[in-house]
Amino acid sequence: MALKRRYLEDIEKSLKQYSGLNLIVEGNEVSLKGQWSLEQDGIVLQTYDILISIPEDYPVCVPIVYETGGKIPRKMDRHINPSSGDACLFVEDERWEIWPIGASFKEFLDVPLRNFFIYQAYFEVMGHFPQGERSHGIIGKIEYFLEKFNLDSEDTVLNILMTAESPSTQNLLCPCGKSRKLKYCHGPVVHRMKTNINSEIWNKTIFQLKERRFERRSHSIEKRMKIQEDFFNTSPLDIL
Amino acid sequence: MFDPNLNQLDLYFNEIYKNLDIPAHLLATANQRYMDLAEWLKKDSEKRFNSNSILYPQGSILLGTPVMPVKARDDFDYDLVYLREIKKEGITQKELKKQVGDQLKAYIEYLKEENSDDIPTLMEGKRCWTLKYPKFHMDILPALPDEEGEYKMNAKDGIIITDKDLHHWQYSNPKGYNAWFKYQMRQSIHEEKVKLARASTLEVEEIPDNNVKTTLQRAIQILKRHRDSTFKGEKDDKPISVIINTLATKAYKNSSNLYQTLQDILTEMDKHIVEKNGVYIVENPINPKENFADKWERYPERKNAFYSWLKSAKEEFIGLERKGSFSEINERLQKSLGNDVVTGAWNSFEKLNAKKNALNIAVSNIKTPTKPWVP
């Protein structure tokens, strides 16, 4: 499946302001290659060689970005996937706030990509990321949900995501405990999150959260059983 | 403008250090020449004497504290121990020294035959041989294993070396001293490795100790440069490196701030000189029987030179946060560390600060912050 014409035009349009990048179309494969130069007040902060690969199901799937000049080490701590070498720009579930479906390609370059390279240039000099970073994997996602929903319980996050993902539940009470209907509480946010994300990724997140809940519960059941076992194995004489 | 606070002074002195360190390309060339020579000597010893030999760095190259000479056209030192694995009973000092000289002459002939583009010249010193290359020279000290174990610590690495009159064997242990030095700053070595690992794809465990430089090593380099500038003419009185190195290590407080480290060292270093019945002792940490300052008794002017150097270093380096602006600091340090070093350091320091400012502005201009993540 080839990239739709209007998306290709939108990408071409963005290059007016990003003249260091060249569009390459080879059969069905679309990519951009070139230099990304960061400047501020006439000072060159850093120049990166980059490759942006546009997925076939763009814009549902986010463009994949590689730093090809070897200036950023390929490691998790630098937010580069060590095996595939692609840059990890943001937690997928955050996408609706950063670069929602429907936003232009130029906005992708302006916001998440530009941020990413500013952060990397900052790290090179200062040794840390300036505006924080997410933990790796599902933990990073949980951090985002807790922050966004203003909660401190992972169980409540899962309850909200599971209840609110269907439009038919919007009149139910929000599981966050504020005694408000979902549609006036966390419902709309979850809806926006879900519609801006590939359904596979969304389902994977829910699955991972369920798995974690199962582990927590079985752990606490095990603990309870251990206490009971200890209690029954203890002879009254021992206690005395 | 930036104020000379502790953090800014840390950055500033790091730039000073970079400007007096041996440039990486020069050190790489010297390392290569050393490895070529070591390999050749090993093969030649097997062929010539049917015995084993090892060539290894000692002194500032081994410790990671070499400095560029004050005059840019002068060489830097690359000191080596040439250990022949034979018993001292089988050879006199004179023979040992001659054999090493013969081998080095043969090495030069070999390089000529190979049409090597970098052929050194050989010079004979009192106890060592010198190979002079462009920009640096290698002092090669003939040595034998110390089988009596004069040194208690790291006895296996003890060596005996020729004396100036080629008569009495002298005892030494450069590897043992290096082990002590690295052990004293192990915490900082680890911290530097963690920093390097974050900036590269290496894991902490993969990084050799020699690939990082601690604040202690950098501070020693700065102090040695200060000494070299102070004693330009009076070479004999110049405090020897091992005294500065030992006292600085004992005074080190593991601060990750280079400027703070300089202050810590200068404040505390003379407290580790012991005075016993009027004799000043700077104990060799791996051999309590050896006094690094033994010459001070015979030449009291050397002791005085050390204390007056320390006094001037204290005046120039301590409390700079309260001693005026950076331009005043520059002016003072130009005299004691050299014009080129301070000017070079100041230029890169200003650039670094400008870059930091620009980065902070770029970050504060971000309207929609994002947080990088890994799936």
Image (tube, rainbow, N blue to C red):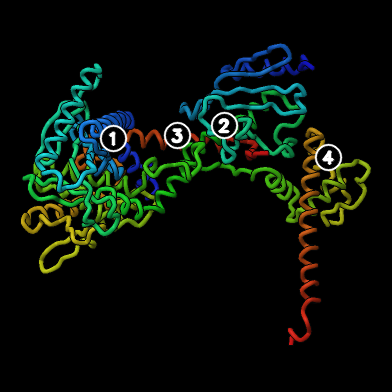
Q: Report whether A125 appears left or right of B241.
A: right
> Residue farthest to the bottom?
A240
Q: Position of residue B264 (x, y in %)?
A: 31, 56
Q: CA distance from mark 1 to mark 3?
A: 25 Å
Assign the C terminus of chain B to one quadrant of the image.
top right
Helix, strand or loop at label 3? It is helix
> Which mark is on residue B55?
none
Residue under numbered circle 2: A117
Mark 1 surroundings within 10 Å by alpha-carbon count, few (fewer than 14), some (14 through 19), many (20 or more): some
* C-beta proximity under 8 Å, tags 3 and 2: no
Q: Position of residue B316 (x, y in %)?
A: 23, 49
> Which mark is on residue B22?
1
Helix, strand or loop at label 4? It is helix
Q: CA distance from mark 3 to mark 4?
A: 42 Å
Q: Position of residue A114 (x, y in %)?
A: 60, 30
> Which mark is on residue B355?
3
Q: CA distance from mark 2 to mark 1?
A: 33 Å
Residue under numbered circle 4: A191
Amino acid type, residue under disc 1 in the picture? Ile
**Residue B108 in view:** yes
Residue B369: image quadrant is top right
Q: Position of residue B320 (x, y in %)?
A: 29, 50
Q: Report whether B229 appears left or right of B11.
A: left
**Residue B34 in view:** no
Q: Are marks 3 and 2 on the same chain?
A: no
Q: Residue at x 51, y 27 (%)?
A: A39
